[in-house]
Image (spheres, rainbow, N blue to C red):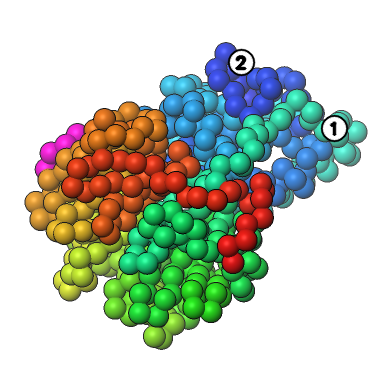
């Protein structure tokens, strides 16, 4: 959107700045193009524009400065350390200003995440665009500004040396593990920050590492394949096939454990820009941040976080299509074609119904397989109806729940931003906190334990938890509710050592 010529409000110097050695001011940035990225780290749309910003930063590094303005939606996102972890998780290299109390948001009259404000070399706002998919618009605008000032002789190309990325050596054996899956013989761990799948015994003895550890999109053997922040998984026990939601590649991958081969089965590697219900040949149909998977018969159901929908891949025919959701971001119940979701990020089933962790409305949804209806099991169903309240149905409050697992008639839920594990009865929607209290890393029993943004769960003989910001897998004795941290013997970060488990 073209803006009237308005001087950009100065950025506060007395608030917290991350990813830089000092606060930045627009006064000192005169002579450069500045893009302010108003974001919050829970938001999938905000995450989608990060690759575009990285592209622009690299192409125009002599004249462009990007500054992230983190204006938090959820209470948990206001914590400085959590923002710092998000910067590391998503490999953000530009400085980030923590916008406490929406001060900068209000000064710039921002109304939605993400919003990008473009400031010219003289310090005036020249454009404001909301939503994702704006790279071409921004690139054209930057080119115009450069050309205009080159003609005037007023441009000052220079490297900006005061910004230094917050660096933390990736030395932890796991990095931001997003999901975990326990099966009869294996424990599958989505080592999301290391872009690989770790396969161990249920006691943590490594069997395979799948993927080089480099971020990419390559099929092939276990030592050749590459992923991009993989998340949810589903396992075909009979055929020894592991299905993976390769989230940042916008693809579904199949891992053949017998032949040790990784193959893409759905997605083009590019993000879909269409949210309307549609479908087609799986390898010719672009997907949008698939986050979790559940296999039911010959169907693979997908929590498609980026398009706020549930999708289905028919494994026999190779057809993928929207199963439920209009694509609008909301919490509307009803038929499969009328309902809406808000960044679904976890999925499980009892065979009759799919259960979905609908993260942006902090609710658990039920999606019919037998009866084609969608309902809210518990939670407010509202984009801003979050909190931490046990109870039943609509009175329940959670905070950005990312994981859900059905076992023995109950739902285990990773209430991620409350750092807790809760137990829900899907029949009456009753919800009770079982594990965890405040953020931290503490083994023990029941609510005396601590987690940090747990995102995935799986139940077999024990409950396994992907404790994302603790870079750990936790194991729970279901009889005593005793939590221990699983030791994955011999595992190390890809940059630290070259393992010989193949």
Residue under the image location 19 percent in, 43 percent down: 480
Q: Quadrant of the N terminus?
A: top right
Front-most of residues 388 and 13: 388
Q: Which residue is mark 1?
A: 158
Q: Quadrant of residue 418?
A: top left
Instruction: Reply yes or no: does residue 297 show up in magenta.
Output: no
Task: Name the spot of residue 487 as percent of width and height, x first.
Answer: 44, 46
Q: Range of the magenta residues?
A: 388-392
**As drawn, which residue projects farthest toward the left?**
428
Q: Which residue is mark 2?
A: 13
Front-most of residues 332 and 361: 361
Label 2 sits on a secondary structure element that is loop
Instruction: Reply yes or no: does residue 389 show up in magenta.
Output: yes
**As drawn, which residue projects farthest toward the top?**
14
Q: Quadrant of residue 124?
A: top right
Side of 127 relative to 48 (left or right): right
Residue under the image location 20 percent in, 65 percent down: 350
267 w.r.t. 415: above or below: below
Number of disc labels: 2
Asked whether residue 308 appears in the rendered view, the answer is: no
């Amino acid at each position: 959107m073209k803006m009237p010529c308005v001087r950009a409000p100065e950025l506060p110097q007395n608030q917290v700045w991350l990813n830089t050695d000092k606060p930045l001011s627009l006064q000192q940035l005169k002579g450069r193009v500045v893009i302010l990225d108003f974001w919050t780290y829970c938001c999938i749309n905000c995450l989608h524009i990060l690759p575009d910003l990285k592209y622009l930063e690299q192409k125009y590094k002599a004249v462009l400065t990007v500054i992230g303005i983190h204006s938090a939606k959820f209470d948990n996102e206001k914590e400085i350390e959590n923002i710092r972890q998000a910067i590391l998780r998503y490999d953000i290299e530009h400085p980030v200003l923590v916008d406490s109390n929406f001060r900068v948001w209000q000064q710039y009259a921002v109304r939605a995440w993400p919003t990008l404000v473009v400031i010219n070399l003289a310090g005036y706002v020249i454009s404001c665009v909301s939503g994702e998919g704006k790279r071409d618009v921004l690139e054209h605008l930057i080119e115009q500004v450069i050309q205009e000032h080159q003609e005037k002789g007023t441009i000052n190309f220079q490297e900006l040396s005061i910004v230094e990325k917050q660096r933390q050596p990736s030395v932890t054996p796991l990095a931001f593990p997003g999901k975990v899956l326990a099966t009869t013989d294996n424990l599958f761990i989505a080592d999301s920050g290391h872009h690989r799948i770790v396969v161990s015994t249920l006691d943590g003895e490594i069997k395979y590492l799948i993927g080089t550890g480099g971020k990419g999109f390559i099929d092939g053997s276990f030592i050749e394949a590459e992923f991009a922040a993989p998340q949810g998984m589903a396992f075909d026990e009979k055929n020894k096939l592991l299905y993976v939601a390769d989230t940042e590649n916008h693809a579904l991958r199949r891992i053949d454990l017998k032949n040790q081969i990784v193959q893409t089965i759905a997605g083009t590697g590019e993000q879909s820009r269409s949210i309307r219900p549609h479908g087609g040949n799986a390898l010719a149909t672009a997907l949008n941040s698939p986050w979790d998977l559940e296999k039911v018969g010959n169907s693979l159901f997908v929590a498609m976080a980026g398009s706020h929908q549930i999708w289905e891949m028919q494994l026999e025919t190779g057809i993928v299509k929207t199963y439920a959701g209009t694509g609008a971001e909301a919490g509307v119940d009803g038929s499969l074609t009328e309902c809406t979701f808000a960044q679904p990020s976890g999925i499980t089933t009892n065979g009759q119904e799919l259960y979905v962790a609908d993260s942006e409305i902090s609710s658990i949804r039920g999606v019919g397989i037998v009866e084609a209806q969608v309902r809210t099991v518990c939670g407010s169903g509202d984009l801003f109806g979050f909190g931490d309240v046990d109870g039943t149905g609509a009175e329940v409050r959670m905070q950005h729940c990312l994981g859900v697992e059905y076992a023995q008639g109950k739902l285990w839920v990773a209430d991620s931003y409350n750092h807790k594990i809760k137990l829900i009865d899907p029949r009456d929607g009753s919800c009770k906190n079982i594990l965890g209290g405040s953020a931290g890393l503490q083994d023990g029993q029941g609510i005396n334990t601590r987690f940090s943004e747990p995102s995935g769960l799986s139940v077999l003989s024990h409950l396994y938890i992907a404790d994302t910001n603790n870079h750990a897998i936790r194991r729970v004795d279901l009889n005593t509710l005793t939590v221990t941290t699983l030791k994955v013997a011999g595992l190390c970060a890809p940059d630290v050592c070259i393992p010989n488990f193949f």
